Amino acid sequence: MPVETNNNKPIKPPKVRQFGGRFFILLTLLLLLNLILPTFFEARSLQVPYSTFITQVEAGKVNQAIVSSDRIEYTIKTETPDGKPTEQVFTTTPVAIDLDLPKILREHNVEFSAPPPNPNAWFATLLSWILPPLIFFGIWGLLMNRQSGPAALTVGKSKARIYSEGSTGVKFSDVAGVDEAKAELAEIVDFLKNATKYTTLGAKIPKGVMLVGPPGTGKTLLAKAIAGEAAVPFFSISGSEFIELFVGVGAARVRDLFEQAKQQAPCIVFIDELDALGKSRGGAGPIIGGNDEREQTLNQLLSEMDGFDTNTGVIIIAATNRPEILDPALRRPGRFDRQVVVDRPDKIGREAILKVHARNVKLADDVNLSTIAIRTPGFAGADLANLVNEAALLAARQNQQAVTMADFNEAIERLIAGLEKRSRVLNETEKKTVAYHEVGHAIIAALMPGAGKVEKISVVPRGVGALGYTIQMPEEDRFLMLEDEIRGRIATLLGGRSAEEIVFGKISTGAADDIQKATELAERTITLYGMSERLGPVAFEKSQQQFLEGYGNLRRAISPKVAEEIDREVKQTLDNAHHIALSILQHNRDLLEQTAEELLQREILEGADLRDRLAQVKVPGEMAEWLRTGKISEDKPLLQTLLV
Ligand code: ADP
Ligand code: MG
Ligand code: ZN
């Protein structure tokens, strides 16, 4: 592809040996030749059974025989129709080792010999030596080829794709909601375009910029947008593409990539998923060898980054969602010294992203993107793109003229709770249990601080496990959770189970997920947020993940006594929340029953009707005290006494 830089110097795309196709034609030709050639050198002769041959020998007709282990060629004296003596050639295949054959032949005076050395035997020998390695390399080449797309046999060659300006088709205007990151990157693009403006002032531009942020926030998209905006060549490669089976290949690739980049400077090198390559060298990985390769590759990258100076105009941009596991050496000044955080968008950001993705979607008049943005806290750019598409698909399925707000609402529910599963049929007891369970959640949620309104209760099964669900919509984005809000959240989670206890006196397995979440939250308040009065602000967990939630946290080394205490505190927190949940539901028993019966009739409760019902929830006296302190007064009835 012809690519042009800003100074109109044509860029040669990385040289690639086109070897795969031609190689296979050559191989096929050789094979054919091997099959055909020997038959050319053979005299044409008649094939007869072995027994015929023996009979003819015994009849004394055979003149001469050439005997080899797998064929016998012999001549017979005959006469032509006009009486002249002539010879006819026959071949036969001997039966397995006939040891009597030489004796028989001698007895009948047949002149016999072994075949002369094959005139083209050298060829066969040669082929037998050359073909296997050729086939081996051929298959290898094919495999390498498959890994790297169009280029073949590129061991040690950089696989970076090169984009010319604008060929990614993405512009900064396609990326929304990450204005700080955009501003920072625009500066880089500007430096590459107008290098002198900066260098005359003596300013140095950073060599490396690292984009960090949760998955789906638009890091890769931003990099593509840079390629689209910058009028310079843009090399793009993913960290995992450096890692190869063979130690040293990755390092060679890095060398090659920088070689190319330096030739094409000013340019941008983009390394996506840097963590695949730049994992801290300290911890030994479980795979022997794999680590060696990564370390070598990383070392090569580090030394390459040191090896060119700032004003060569090569800027390296990397993206990762796990900055905490990166080797510290990568982040020291002079390497990836600038970190640009690409975080989940806030409400305004989400609206902007929705606008970008709704550009080509026909929206009905009732669609309010700002409302959708309010209802989707925590959604990243990729989720929002998905949401718009899901809504459009829903509208199309119903042959609508435009995408309506109802489609968006359904799409949000789909993304939060999964697809509706009306095919899952519950029996009467199950349905009743689910209805009371969900109303239990809703009633508690209505009283708890900071959690947002309950928007909908449904007993239509959805997704993988949900038999029913309650949707709460926050009114605003929240970045902190207060103590009492966490307590409220735990009580809300336990509300479902509590309703089952109060109404049926019997509990079901349906609360497993709630209990899991409540326990996790209770544990975090103590081990991570330091909210326990007894244990104080001590972190018992090492928080390791910045952007990926839900895995990787390790317990600090603690004494068994402290472990016991943590367990006790977690249990106490859960018990108290459970107690309050039971107490609230007991206070609102009539409301619980009425609402659950109504829900059983209608399957879904939402809107004004639901709001009016939940506005009637009565507050038990002990709730305020518990919200404030997390404690329950001693003289109050215990959980068990409520369970009648
Ligand atoms: P990341 O690399 O951060 O994991 P991507 O850049 O691959 O995320 O984002 C995936 C898709 O999500 C993009 O192709 C785009 O459609 C959408 N997207 C993500 N973030 C944004 C954003 N800030 N603005 C517009 N679209 C976005
Ligand atoms: Mg990405
Ligand atoms: Zn539940």
Image (tube, helix red, strand yellow):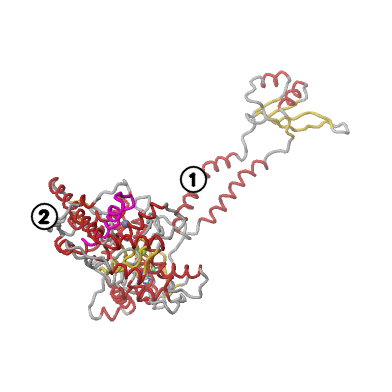
Tell me the kind of residue under disc 1. Pro
* Residue 170 location (% of width, % of height): 41, 73
Q: Main secondary structure of the magenta part?
A: helix
Image quarter of residue 316:
bottom left
For the residue pair 102 and 202, the one nearer the viewer reads as 202
- The kind of secondary structure element at disc 1 is helix
Q: Quadrant of ligand 2?
A: bottom left
Count all numbered tags in the image, as a single digit: 2
Tell me the kind of residue under disc 2. Arg
* Residue 200 location (% of width, % of height): 25, 81
For the residue pair 403 and 263, the one nearer the viewer reads as 403
Q: Indicate which label's residue lies in the foreground, 1 or 2.
A: 2
Residue 534 is marked as 2
Is 274 left, or right, of 523 in this rendering? right
Magenta span covers which residues? 487-511
Reply yes or no: does residue 324 show up in magenta: no
Is 623 left, or right, of 321 in this rendering? left
